Amino acid sequence: MLVLTKTTGFRHESIPDGVRAIQRLGRTHRMTVDTTSSSSRFTSKVLNRYDAVIFLSATGTPIADRTQQRAFERYIKAGGGYLGVHAASDTRGKWAWYEGLVGARFTRHAPGTARATVRVEDRTSAATKGLPAAWTRTDEWYEFDRNPRAGVHVLATVDETTYSGGTMGADHPIAWCHRYDGGRSVYTAMGHTRESFSERRYLAHLLGAIEMAAGRARFNCAP
């Protein structure tokens, strides 16, 4: 897999922790992990080496060059896999295709970090198996420009009654997957804190999401 850490907007302190966690998962589960902070790796020749590309809180316009964008689009159309982690939905460029790949665009988050309850809807996917139906954890809780449910398979929602500042309502998706333009897309809005990447359940969630994006796990992701 290729992990992109480039940011042109807010840069999360947890990115190095996320890289190290993914590298550890790779060593343990026999997956090769390459990392890059440069979009120059986004060529068809390079991307075709990978089963999945992970945008690890890559914000703003991490791929602004249209040639590089087209190379990534071809990669997905050829059956490639994408995993967006946390701020990968915080896009500021004019790339509607990528926003469709993610499933929704970040607009705001509740103040600070907070302890809240995640409601795991689908406990059969690789990204959610073994998680409790009510998963209480601390994170930064994102809101989006739309509820993506109509176009994605929702894996988990966050219960706004368990923290302050949520405005999306009773149905607040926080992790999902879908087929997109020939490829596989998985997104989790969790992973803001450095502590997330040493949290046992979050790491199990992340590993399963990687395996789904890479085509190593069942991908039952119809809306």
Image (cartoon, helix red, strand yellow):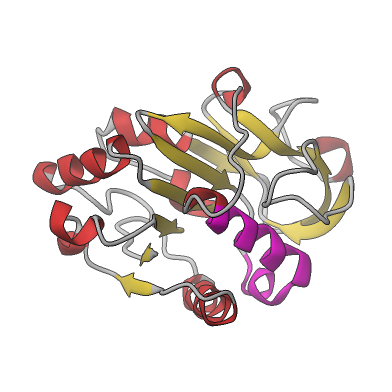
Q: Residue at x 56, y 40 (%)?
A: 108
Q: Residue at x 88, y 37 (%)?
A: 161
Image quadrant in which the C terminus is located: top right
Image quadrant in which the N terminus is located: bottom left
Q: Quadrant of residue 11?
A: bottom left
Residue in the foreground of this view, choosing between 186 and 220: 220
Indicate whether residue 50 is drawn in magenta.
no
Residue 190 is situated, as x and y percent measured from the top left of the image, at 64, 54
Residue in the foreground of this view, choosing between 163 and 138: 138
Residue 34 is situated, as x and y percent measured from the top left of the image, at 35, 74
Indicate whether residue 208 is drawn in magenta.
yes
Q: Which residues are magenta?
A: 193-211
Q: Residue 178 vs residue 35: left or right? A: right
Q: Residue 132 vs residue 169: left or right? A: right
Residue in the foreground of this view, choosing between 96 and 76: 76
Task: Count the marks.
Answer: 0
Q: Residue at x 77, y 43 (%)?
A: 124
Q: Residue 147: tell me if it is visible.
A: no
Q: Quadrant of residue 203?
A: bottom right
Q: Is residue 119 above or below residue 130?
A: above
